[in-house]
Amino acid sequence: MSAPLLGVDLGGTSTKLLLGRPGPDGAEPLEQTQVPTPRGPGALDLLADRVQAFLAGRTVAAAGVTVPGLLDGDGVVTRSVNLPWLDGVAVGDVLGTALGVPVVAVHDGRAAARAEAVLGAGRGHADVYVLTLGTGIAGAQVIGGQVLAGAHLSAGEVGHVSQDDHGRLCSCGQRGCLETLVGAEHLARRWQEVLAAEGSTPQTAPTARDLVEAARAGHPGASAVLDQATTALARALLALLATVDPGLVVVGGGLGQAADVVVAPAVVKLTERATFHSVPPVVPSALGPWAGAWGAVLGAADQR
Amino acid sequence: MSAPLLGVDLGGTSTKLLLGRPGPDGAEPLEQTQVPTPRGPGALDLLADRVQAFLAGRTVAAAGVTVPGLLDGDGVVTRSVNLPWLDGVAVGDVLGTALGVPVVAVHDGRAAARAEAVLGAGRGHADVYVLTLGTGIAGAQVIGGQVLAGAHLSAGEVGHVSQDDHGRLCSCGQRGCLETLVGAEHLARRWQEVLAAEGSTPQTAPTARDLVEAARAGHPGASAVLDQATTALARALLALLATVDPGLVVVGGGLGQAADVVVAPAVVKLTERATFHSVPPVVPSALGPWAGAWGAVLGAADQR
C-alpha cells in the first residue's frame, strides 16, 4: 500500500494534523491530533517541527495545508486576516522544503467543502452543494469532486445575496443579505433585541446557541426569530435549486447542526414553495471539524 | 484537413443546417441554409433527405442535432412540446442511420449557450455565463467549454428566482420571479396596462419590442416599466455574481439586443450596487440565430 498522506488544517488558534488515505470507504484517519497554531515570523518552521514530531519518522507521499485566506495561482498567500504573517508566503513551498515532501496549499473553506462532498456526507454523489451556516454563510458547488471556485475565487457567497433592499445592513455593505437573517451574529443580535423588548437583561451577551435553546424550550419570541430565518433560508435554497440544481445539499456549520429548529423547518418551507424545482436531499455534514484537514489530504492526493 | 461537421438545429417551424469546423477562429461556416421543419411521423426521414440534398455528396465526420425538448441519458426525447412526434424517439440514432454518420442529439438551449461561450462572444474565456432574455429567461454556466446542466437538467432557471413573494404570478407557479419583471410577455402586458391607463387602445396587442421603442422615444410610462425591469435584472445579476462568480456574462435573446434601454442600464445599476462582487464584462451574444446550429456542431465534435 502506498504511503499515507498528511493533511494540515491551519486555523487561527489551533492546527489539526491528520494522517490518512482517502479511499472508497471515505474518511478513515490513521492518526489525528491538534496543536496550537504557531504565530509570527518563524511560525512555519515551528509548525514543521510539530509535524515531524507527529509523524515520528513515518513517511508520507505528499501533504496539503489549508490557509485561512486568499491564495494566488502560485500558492502564495495574498491576504490572511487571521494569520497576517503568512501574507506573501508560499506556505506550501516553505513547508515542503522543511518536510522534504511536496506540499500544496489550499483554501480552507473550499478544502473543507470538497472533503464533505467527496469523503463526507456527499460521498458517492457527483453534484453536491455544501452550505455552511455559521457567523458567515458560505456555499460551495462540488462537481465531480472539484469545487467551482468562480472566476475571481468568490463563488459561493450565497450569504451575501440580498433578499430585501430595505433590510438590515450587512458586513458586505449590502442590505438584507441572507447573512443578516440567518448568520449567527445577526441571530444573536435579534435574540438580544427580543429579550430587551421583554425587559430581560442577561448577564452575558446572548448567542445564536442561546436562541436555538430558547426556541427548543418553546419561547415564542425565539421561535419567531427562527421562523423568519428559516423562511429566508428556504428562499435562498429555492434560488440555489433554480440556479445550480444540485443533486444533494450538505448543511454544516454551527447552525447547520441545529437540524430540528433550523434546517428541518427550512426544508419544509422549501418543499412547500417548490414548483418546477427538483428538491434534492438536504443532509447534515459528516466530517465535522476535521473536514478542512481531509480537504488538505485531498489536495495532497492531487499531487501524486 | 479532416472532414467538416454538420449541425442541425431543429426548430419548431424551421430547421437550420450548418456545415463547419469549430476552430481557433471561432464560428466560420463553410455553408449554411434553412429549411422548413418536417412535421409528423416520417419527419426524420424527410429531414435526412433534406440534409443529403444540402450536403450534395460532401462527406461529414459526424453530426449533431438540437432537440427542442427534454432528452434522457440515451438521447431519447422524453418530452417535446413543440414537436410531439419526437417523443420516445432516439433522434440522433434515427438520423445517424439515415445519414450513415454518428449523430448526437443535444438540448437546444444548452447547445446554443455552449456555442456562444465557446465559439461566440465568450470565446477564449474559461468561465462564461450565458443569459438569454426573451419570453423566457434562461441561464447557462459554461466552464471549460461544458455547460453545467444540473443534477436534474434544470440548472440555469434564473428566470424563476422570485424577487418578491407578493409579486405577479409566474407561469412556474411562483410569484415575483425575474420573468414576471423582465420576460418579454410580462413586459408587453405591463406596457399594455400603461397604455390602457392612459386611455390608449392600440389596434394590435403591444409587444415588448413596442415598449422598447416607446422608451427610446422618451415615453415616461415605458421608461418606468423598463426601469423596474432593469432594477430586477441588476438584482438577478448581483445574485449570480455572488453565487457562481462568472468571468464573463454574455447576454442574448430579443431583449438582450436592446442594449441601450435594457442591458446597459442594468449593468449601471449592477455596478452601483456591487460591494464585494467582482463585476465581469457583460457583452452581447455574437452568433445570433445560428448559435443552436453551432452547438450541434460542437456536439458532433465531441463524437470524433
Image (cartoon, coloured by chain):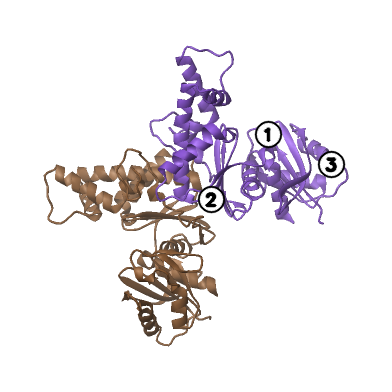
Chain colours: A brown, B purple
Q: Nearer the viewer, residue A184 or B219?
A: B219
Total marks shown come to 3
Amino acid, disc 3: Gln
Q: Could you tell me residue A125's position as x and y percent?
A: 51, 58
Q: Residues within 10 Å of mark 2 (few under 14, many from 20)?
A: many
Screen quadrant of the C terminus of chain B:
bottom right
Q: Does residue B113 appear in the picture of this structure?
A: yes
Instruction: Give the CA separation, mark 1 to mark 2.
Output: 25 Å
Label 1 belongs to which residue?
B83
Q: Nearer the viewer, residue A170 or B68?
A: A170
Screen quadrant of the N terminus of chain B:
bottom right
Instruction: Check chain identity for marks 3 and 1: say if they share one.
Output: yes
Q: Residue at x 25, y 42 (%)?
A: A224
Residue B185 falls left or right of residue A189: right
Q: Residue at x 48, y 15 (%)?
A: B196
User: Which mark is first along the chain, 2 or 1?
Assistant: 1
Q: How crowded is mark 3: few (under 14 residues within 10 Å), some or many (20 or more)?
A: some
Instruction: Check chain identity for marks 2 and 3: say if they share one.
Output: yes
Label 3 belongs to which residue?
B52
